[in-house]
Amino acid sequence: MTGGPEDRMGGERVYRGRVIHVDLDRVRFPDGSTGELEMVRHPGASAVVPLTTREGTSQPIVTLVRQYRYAAGGYIWEIPAGKLDAGEPPEDCARRELEEETGLRAGRLEALSHIHTTPGFTDEVIHLFVALELAPGRLSHEPNEFIELHERPLEEVMAMVVGGEITDAKTICALALADRWWSEGRR
Amino acid sequence: MTGGPEDRMGGERVYRGRVIHVDLDRVRFPDGSTGELEMVRHPGASAVVPLTTREGTSQPIVTLVRQYRYAAGGYIWEIPAGKLDAGEPPEDCARRELEEETGLRAGRLEALSHIHTTPGFTDEVIHLFVALELAPGRLSHEPNEFIELHERPLEEVMAMVVGGEITDAKTICALALADRWWSEGRR
């Protein structure tokens, strides 16, 4: 893999925000040419598929959040997720956000993968997990976080993905990976 | 669904870029409270899973692109994709980007879904398609676009998703949907 921080030849911060910053970087491309690229800097995040099974069945149930997203024009379906605090390991962030948003504590967390949300203009990476052996914890929503909780069978949730009812990218990626993980018996 | 443009009470453009702009919007939340949100405005995009079958088999083959992404620190695996031109229908964009990046013309295009790439801070939406009945067309890469083409069986590509080798969110979403679409025989 070529590329990396050594491709950065300089640049300037053109916007310093609360969550994101925007840099205009001078970049050396793989052919040796140079150019300028706009880059939204983001601290990264973790997202979790919380899975339980009902007594007497092996059908997995997902806890989804229905969250207000101004950028998407209203409430959309997601999985619990949130930004990394400074220096926070992705797994700790996943456990913290799961408990804050759903009130559930994960007895076990399994890493699925990580994603680049939209690498054309941001360095944001989201780490994806499955949470299992869930126990009651403490709910604590952040200001301006509007969240409803919904439990649905994984099979039904996958039909919501295929039917276009779930449109959040991290959620689709994590559900598709969790569905394979579950069906391949890695639980 | 509550929410939408009527939630915007005002704001200002804090960065005007080449591809993206950043707005600091004053927003009315679902509980009636108000606050400010940073919002990266993006024109939207289309992305395509190009599928063919080898003579004498029913095993689908995907044309992947391996593309230099400064934000991801080097070359990453993706599907053909690109930004909507002003007023361009997503389907036209999908056909155009497919031909520009891979030199393939789609005889048939099927819509899979659309995704919000990262709705916490951007309004970017990517429209996802499967392209079939592929015929030779004309390759034309944009400046600063560094792309290699690779043909791989869909099954192998899905293993690259599960194994964490493919990390681009739109690519994982589109492949997961295309894999279901194919296996459910909707071709």
Image (tube, coloured by chain):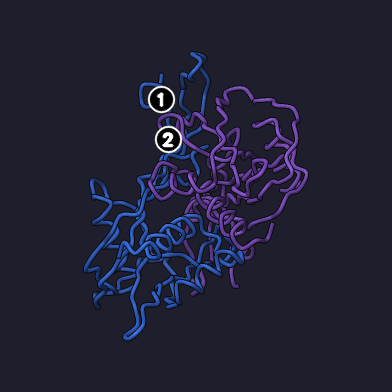
Chain colours: A blue, B purple
Taking A86 as reference, is B163 left or right? right
From the top left corner, tell me how far across and down residue B146 is, in percent: 55, 25
Left-right relation of A170 to B143: left
Q: Is residue B98 above or below residue A143?
A: above
Type of amino acid at the residue the image marks with label 1: Gly
Can you give x and y, in whole percent of width and height, for residue A124 in the image?
A: 41, 44
Q: Residues within 10 Å of mark 2 (few under 14, many from 20)?
A: many
The front one of A150 and A100 is A150
Quadrant placement of the N terminus of chain B: bottom right
Tally of numbered tags: 2
Q: Check the image and report above or below for A124 versus A94.
A: above
Identified at 55% across, 50% down, the residue is: B175
Label 1: state its secondary structure. loop
Residue furthest to the front: B56
Decide: few, some or many residues near mark 1? Use Cα within 10 Å; few <14, some 14-19, many ≥20: some
Horizontal relation, residue B64 to residue B129: left or right: left
Which residue is outermost to the top?
Answer: A32
Kindly identify which residue carries mark 2: B72
Q: Quadrant of the rendered structure where residue A153 is?
A: bottom left
Q: Residue at x 33, y 62 (%)?
A: A130
Considering only vertical position in the picture, is A176 above or below B13?
below
- Residue appearing at x 23%, y 65% in the figure: A108
Is any atom of residue B122 visible in this view?
yes
Q: Quadrant of the C terminus of chain B?
A: bottom right
Chain for mark 2? Answer: B
The answer to whether the residue labelled 1 contacts the one labelled 2, judged by CB atoms less than 8 Å apart, is yes
Can residue B9 be seen?
A: no
Q: Which residue in the structure is indicated by mark 1?
A: A3
Q: Looking at the picture, does residue B29 appear above or below residue B91?
A: below
Identity, as a three-letter code, of the amino acid under mark 2: Ala
